[in-house]
């Protein structure tokens, strides 16, 4: 039983137990030691996502990450959620030049004019996909017939930067007007939303 031998009245025990658990398990090397990064690895990365709003969120965040470290984006994630109205694609698609100026002035996000313009444009393209396919979820998972692609990398060096699948999806997204969706970004996106499972063999999340 979790927490056995610890008083439920002592919150310090919960913190110590949690920290001990985080430090004791083996995980993908990229998770490092930052608690925020570790929680993302343990609870989100590689978990299949079928919620359109979450799929839109990760698409925007992966695009924002281009040229930066992912931990930088994770640290700004809550600010992004506020700035982009909870990542509701319908709301973001209605953003005006005034909204774009607001975002450019927001120090809590990546203030890159091209990335901000792409996020707004991608929201419109996202809605178009929803209209055509019923949901972005249906569109995305159709590329893999609804089944996760399970990799089995021995280490980080065995994890590809892109694959034919990512290249095919990237090409289709670009055709539909999406921006910041090159094959490398798309592959990172597929890993993030669980279309691809690339946890390394020594990771406790491998195969889960």
Image (spheres, rainbow, N blue to C red):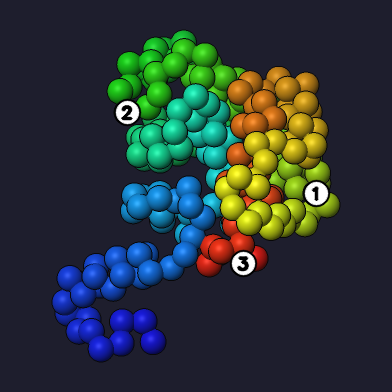
The reply, left or right, for residue 34 in relation to residue 143 is left
Q: Name the residue located 20 percent from the left edge and 84 percent from the top edge.
A: 7
Residue at image mark 3: 208
Q: Nearer the viewer, mark 3 or mark 1?
A: 3
- Quarter the N terminus occupies: bottom left
**Cβ–Cβ below 8 Å for labels 2 and 3?**
no
Residue at image mark 1: 144
The spot of residue 129 in percent (x, y) is 73, 33
Q: N-terminal of the two: label 1 or label 2?
A: 2
**Mark 2 Cα shell of 10 Å, populated few (<14), some (14-19), many (≥20):** some
Q: On screen, 94 above or below 42?
A: above
**Mark 1 Cα shell of 10 Å, populated few (<14), some (14-19), many (≥20):** few
**Cβ–Cβ below 8 Å for labels 1 and 2?**
no
Q: Secondary structure at mark 2?
A: loop
State how far apart marks 2 and 3 are (Cα): 34 Å
Q: Secondary structure at mark 1?
A: loop
Q: Name the residue located 73 percent from the left edge and 29 percent from the top edge.
A: 170
Q: Name the residue located 65 percent from the left edge and 27 percent from the top edge.
A: 181
The spot of residue 29 in percent (x, y) is 48, 52
Numbered circle sitting on residue 109: none
Residue at image mark 2: 108
State how far apart marks 1 and 2 are (Cα): 35 Å
Q: N-terminal of the two: label 3 or label 1?
A: 1
All told, the count of numbered labels is: 3
The spot of residue 180 in percent (x, y) is 61, 23
| Residue toward you, 192 or 89 | 192
């Amino acid at each position: 039983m979790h927490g056995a031998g610890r008083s439920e009245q002592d919150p310090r025990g919960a913190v110590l137990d949690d920290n001990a658990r985080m430090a004791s398990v083996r995980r993908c090397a990229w998770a490092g030691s930052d608690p925020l990064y570790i929680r993302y690895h343990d609870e989100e990365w590689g978990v299949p996502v079928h919620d359109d709003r979450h799929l839109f969120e990760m698409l925007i965040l992966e695009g924002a990450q281009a040229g930066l470290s992912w931990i930088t984006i994770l640290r700004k994630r809550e600010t992004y959620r506020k700035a982009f109205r909870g990542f509701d694609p319908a709301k973001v698609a209605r953003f005006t030049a005034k909204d774009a100026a607001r975002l450019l002035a927001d120090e809590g996000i990546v203030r890159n004019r091209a990335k901000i313009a792409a996020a707004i444009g991608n929201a419109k393209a996202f809605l178009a996909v929803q209209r055509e396919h019923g949901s972005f979820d249906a569109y995305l998972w159709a590329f893999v017939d609804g089944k996760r692609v399970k990799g089995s990398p021995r280490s980080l060096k065995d994890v590809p930067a892109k694959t034919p699948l990512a290249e095919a999806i990237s090409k289709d997204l670009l055709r539909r007007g999406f921006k910041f969706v090159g094959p490398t970004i798309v592959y990172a996106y597929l890993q993030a939303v669980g279309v691809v499972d690339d946890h390394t063999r020594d990771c406790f999340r491998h195969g889960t």
